[in-house]
Image (cartoon, rainbow, N blue to C red):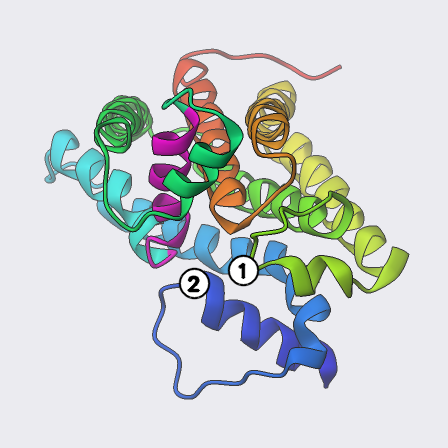
């Protein structure tokens, strides 16, 4: 029952899908964090289902690509995109630590946020256009969503948090090794299923999400001396972007796994 409630809390916080009622229990916050990868399952399956429905010959590839570009951010309630924009503003300001934190928490949108979100959507649209045009390995969309959120959950459960972060309670009161082991199992299982589904291409796509997330998290972790919700959102978006770019590049490639 605790796990189900924690999963429902995670859906309410990290998913934009309307829920019939709200549950919030501070004691279940560590369980909620552990369930974040399962939110990726829900968002990924819905995204994959939408892509499968749209990829019919009568629809314009450009329109399909546009819808698939917007879909993940809409399904997530734009929470990760908000973190991506806030972090971009602070990170690329190249100010000292105090000013970076101030900019990170500033609700106003700055120039760097606008520039980076335009770049993000251009790259995402290009990737979605290639994927929609070829329509191969669509199931890896689910894997990308799960892996990126597994990385976020693992970061919350293992990394030092910023003193100014709202995630302090989650990090200070984590559920020990159990949650970390669960997240690692989900991550490994997703990688294995990706390989079974798409062979070496599945492995490369999933690995690119891990690398993209790790590099983004390393950058912001050093710059802000810890993690926060915004930094997690930034890293998740960057990891997924890497995954979709690689998936788009490999659309026309046939590689057999030996």
Residue at image position (33%, 53%) is 78
Residue at image position (35%, 44%) is 81
Q: Is residue 80 magenta?
A: yes
Q: Quadrant of the C terminus?
A: top right
Helix, strand or loop at label 1? It is helix
The magenta segment: 76-91
- 3 relative to 123, above or below: below
* Residue 16 rendering spot, x and y as whole percentages: 36, 64
Helix, strand or loop at label 2? It is loop
Q: Mark 2 near mark 1, Cβ–Cβ under 8 Å?
A: yes
Left or right placement of residue 188 versus residue 5 in this view: right
Residue at image position (72%, 86%) is 1
Q: Earlier in the sequence, mark 2 or mark 1?
A: 2
Left or right placement of residue 210 versus residue 66 in this view: right
Nearest the camera: 246 or 202? 246
* Residue 169 rendering spot, x and y as whole percentages: 68, 65
How many residues crowd around disc 2 within 10 Å: few (fewer than 14), some, or many (20 or more)?
A: many
Residue lying at the far right in this picture: please name it.
177
Residue at image position (50%, 69%) is 11
Snapshot quadrant of residue 143: top right
Q: Which residue is mark 1?
A: 39
* Residue 38 rendering spot, x and y as whole percentages: 60, 59
Nearest the camera: 118 or 226? 226
* Residue 82 rendering spot, x and y as whole percentages: 35, 47
Snapshot quadrant of residue 241: top left
Q: Main secondary structure of the magenta part?
A: helix
Q: Which residue is mark 2?
A: 15
Q: Is residue 221 magenta?
A: no
What whole-number distance in Å separates the C-alpha atoms at marks 2 and 1?
Answer: 7 Å
């Amino acid at each position: 029952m605790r796990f189900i409630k924690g999963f429902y809390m995670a859906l309410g916080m990290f998913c934009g899908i309307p829920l019939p009622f709200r549950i919030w229990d501070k004691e279940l916050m560590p369980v909620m964090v552990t369930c974040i990868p399962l939110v990726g399952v829900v968002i990924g399956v819905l995204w994959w289902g939408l892509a499968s429905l749209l990829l019919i010959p009568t629809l314009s590839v450009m329109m399909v690509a546009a819808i698939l570009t917007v879909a993940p951010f809409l399904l997530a309630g734009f929470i990760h995109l908000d973190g991506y924009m806030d972090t971009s503003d602070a990170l690329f300001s190249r100010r000292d630590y105090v000013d970076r934190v101030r900019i990170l928490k500033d609700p106003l949108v700055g120039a760097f946020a606008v520039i980076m979100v335009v770049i993000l959507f251009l790259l995402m649209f290009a990737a979605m256009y290639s994927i929609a045009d070829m329509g191969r390995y669509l199931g890896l969309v689910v894997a990308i969503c799960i892996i990126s959120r597994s990385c976020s959950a693992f970061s919350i459960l293992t990394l030092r948090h910023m003193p100014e972060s709202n995630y302090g309670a989650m990090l200070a009161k984590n559920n020990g090794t159990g949650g970390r082991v669960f997240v690692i199992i989900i991550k490994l299982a997703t990688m294995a299923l990706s390989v079974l589904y798409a062979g070496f291409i599945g492995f490369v796509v999933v690995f690119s999400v891990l690398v993209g997330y790790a590099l983004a998290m390393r950058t912001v972790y050093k710059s802000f001396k810890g993690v926060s919700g915004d930094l997690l959102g930034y890293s998740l978006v960057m990891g997924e972007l890497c995954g979709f770019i690689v998936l788009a590049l490999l659309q026309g490639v046939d590689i057999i796994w030996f």
